[in-house]
Image (spheres, grey):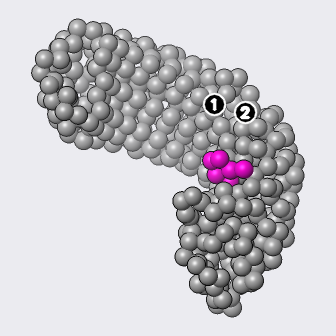
Amino acid sequence: MVSALVQLNEAWGTWAGNSNAATACAAWAGVTCSPKGLVLALDAKAFVADPPPSGAIPADITNLAYLQYLDLSYIDLVGSIPSLASLTSLTHLAIGMDGCRLAGTLDGLGWLSSLSNLQTLRLVGLADFTGDLSSLHILSHLESIQHLALSSLTNATGEIPREIRYLTALTALDLSYLRAVDFPDWVTQLPNLQSLNVNADDERRQGLLSDDFSLLTALTSLSLGHNNLDGYLPKSWSSLVNLQELDLTYNRLQGTIPATFSTLTALTKLVLSENSLSGSIPPAFSTNIQILWLGYNSFSGPIPPHLALTNLVELQLSSNLFTGGIPSAFTKLTAMSTLDICNNSLSSDLDVVAQMTWLTDIHVSGSGDVDHRHMTWLTDM
């Protein structure tokens, strides 16, 4: 087994912590071995360097027949991905990172269906991989998988395979930055999801915001940004009582924020910016919220005092139709570092903001008839 590690070391350059080729398996950084010296885990995060090691994935890696954990996401890989079908003990496989130079075709990854023990699979940043996303339907054979990330495969085309909906053991699913045109609404059929990221970056993407997300009551994180989703914020989402982070930025959502969102008491981050939401802001937010972005909508009326949420760190209200001044209750928000109220129709002076001397990032320009006379402390920032 040590000989296989030496071959990997020659392929990627010296690993951090291994100035010489070690003769004992356990002496290798990022390597976990059995008492008999069998290599069980290889984790590139443990020997990350700046710049990261670079090179191809050598075929010799298949000699690590007992490998259960393989994470190569912190290596600047080049070339192709060899078949790892023989590594049938793998439970964790992660390949790729931003800027990764691996190349190939998605239909050349059919060997993944042989890894029936996989619980985690991460294929991220494989921007030079081409082919049809639908060829990844073979992943539906991985019935034990709990964490799946297929992210930033930016040269792949076609639609995300619907067969993924059969992987009902999934608790975390990342389908972000894929060039599929249709929004994968079938994700609501995965009842055990706790984390779901379908953020997109393709103007062609479209779909409807579904009530069916209310069925995913185990969700703690939901990111659906940049999907051009039409519709309204569903009142039924009040069932998502475990939700901690919700990101719906850059969609086409209309209407108001439902008062039923008051049941989402676990929320710490809510991002609704860049939509077409309107009306006044209801008292529907958890006091646990730390990040609240409501900018670039059509909210109107005074900024309500109930937005003075104790734990707020970032509040973005820019480019709306708010009028009046800033509630005096904001002077108690000592945890806040960022306040953005620019491009509204505020008519009162900002004496309240002038008292918030702990702010490190503030935006007030274009907020109507604001008075900056008492905000000289900003010049020291």
Residue type at mark 2 is: Arg
Query: Could you tell me what secondary structure mostly forms the magenta stretch?
Result: loop
Which quarter of the figure has residue 340? Answer: top left
Q: Please check the rendered image and state whether residue 24 is part of the magenta-colored stretch, yes or no.
A: no
Nearer-N-terminus badge (1/2): 2
Measure the C-alpha gap from mark 1 to mark 2: 8 Å
Q: Secondary structure at mark 2?
A: loop
- Is 318 rendered above or below residue 185? above
Q: Where residue 291 is drawn, which disc sits there?
A: none
- Is 155 rendered above or below residue 7? above
Which residue does the numbered mark 2 point to in the structure image? Answer: 179
Asked if residue 219 lies left or right of residue 116, the reply is: left
- Residue 94 seen in the figure: no
Where is residue 302? Give x, y as percent: 27, 14
Which quarter of the figure has residue 375? Answer: top left
**Residue drawn at x 34%, y 35% as measured from the top left:** 314
- Is 57 rendered above or below residue 248? below
Q: Secondary structure at mark 1?
A: loop
Q: Quadrant of the N terminus?
A: bottom right
Where is residue 100? Give x, y as percent: 68, 50
Asked if residue 246 lies left or right of residue 340, the reply is: right
Magenta residue span:
95-101
Asked if residue 46 lies left or right of residue 79, the reply is: left
Which residue does the numbered mark 1 point to in the structure image? Answer: 201
Crowding at mark 2 (Cα within 10 Å: few <14, some 14-19, many 20+):
many
